[in-house]
Amino acid sequence: MRGSRYIQLAVASLWTTRAQAANDTSYDPSLNFRPNNVTENGLYHWIGSYYNGTTRIEFTPFGGLSSDDADDEFWESCPKLRGKTITTNYNTLLAVTESGEYNLGNNPINAYLTTWAPDFNFNSLLETETMAVMPINYALFSANPMYTFDDILYVKNNFNFTLAATKAAPYNLSSTLSEYYGDGALDFNMTSCDGKDTVEWGGYLINELWWKRPSYNHSYPDPVLSLQFDGQTANLTVDGYYLAEPKPAGHNTFDTVNVEVPGTMKISFLGRIDSYHSDVLVNDSSTPTWKRSVGFNNNTLNVGDTSSSGAPSQQFGTWGIALGALISLATLYI
């Protein structure tokens, strides 16, 4: 994610091919990392479940400033946009993993949702490449991903999960995003305020931390995130409010200065398990728990498994791609 806020917190690591986990003297089972015999890129570094699918973004503008801010003379309203829903779909990978010794807080899992350009070639990612340098369009990290742990550097949670009481999967978790709006930017094409152009807009989820316009009288509730998953499928939703701004471009026929459009935002991910990269989720536990299989040669569906000649040969699972044109996003807006 070149240029994102996360880069400053990233910890680089090398993922090299070594002996099987059972014979690897460097392997520490108290950590949530995969054993060193697993030669995969930094998307799959942790014990857990990985889901491939599609994220749908729906933005419905209010038509400019909210009614409480209508008297603000410094900002332009966009009545032509009122009530028009803009929808975009993205290729997505969701990682739901064990929490680590390096995680500060009590989250029962780590969750990393990453969205990608429709034509991105995942085979181009290097084994030593971490998420910090990958061309991810937009991401939601429950905590910043860590690739090593030395009992010195810890990471705090970006948001705190509440796990609903259960005796088995599926697991239901929820959180509010009061101090975090994601990494990267949710960019899309939308009509200009004067209705004459289709231009690129960018912006961010509104929450308590990032809503800092002193002249605005209106406040918005924090976004709410919900996650449900089991050994086969996962879905993640975020419901909240979004502030969009047009990006300056020479061909625009309207002034992009002082134009801000708030509205409702819904992020919806639906995915299926990528058995090739996933450990086995224990479905009869009150908290998410995994049987470690990737790198342990005990599951023929996994990458690198040699216990059966029926092991799969392709690297990536099947992507669930939504119908319709997928819109390429700008790299980052932050």
Image (spheres, rainbow, N blue to C red):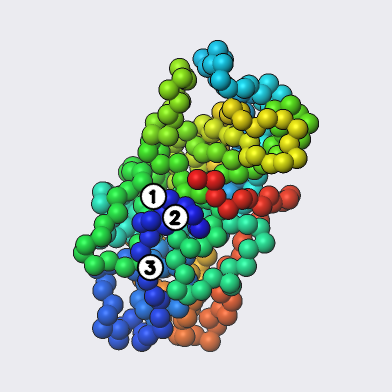
Q: Which of 120/31 is in front?
A: 120
Residue tagged 3: 12
Relative to 76, residue 32 above or below = below
The amino acid on which the numbered mark 3 sits, given as a three-letter code, is: Ala
Residue tagged 1: 142
Q: Earlier in the sequence, mark 2 or mark 1?
A: 2
* Marks 3/2: CA–CA distance: 17 Å
Q: Which mark is residue 331?
A: none
Residue at far left of view: 151
Residue tagged 2: 112
Q: Residue at x 47, y 20 (%)?
A: 216
Q: Position of residue 142 (x, y in %)?
A: 39, 50
Mark 2 in CB contact with mark 1 (< 8 angstroms)? yes
* Marks 2/1: CA–CA distance: 7 Å
Left or right: 34 as drawn, with respect to 241? left
The amino acid on which the numbered mark 1 sits, given as a three-letter code, is: Ser
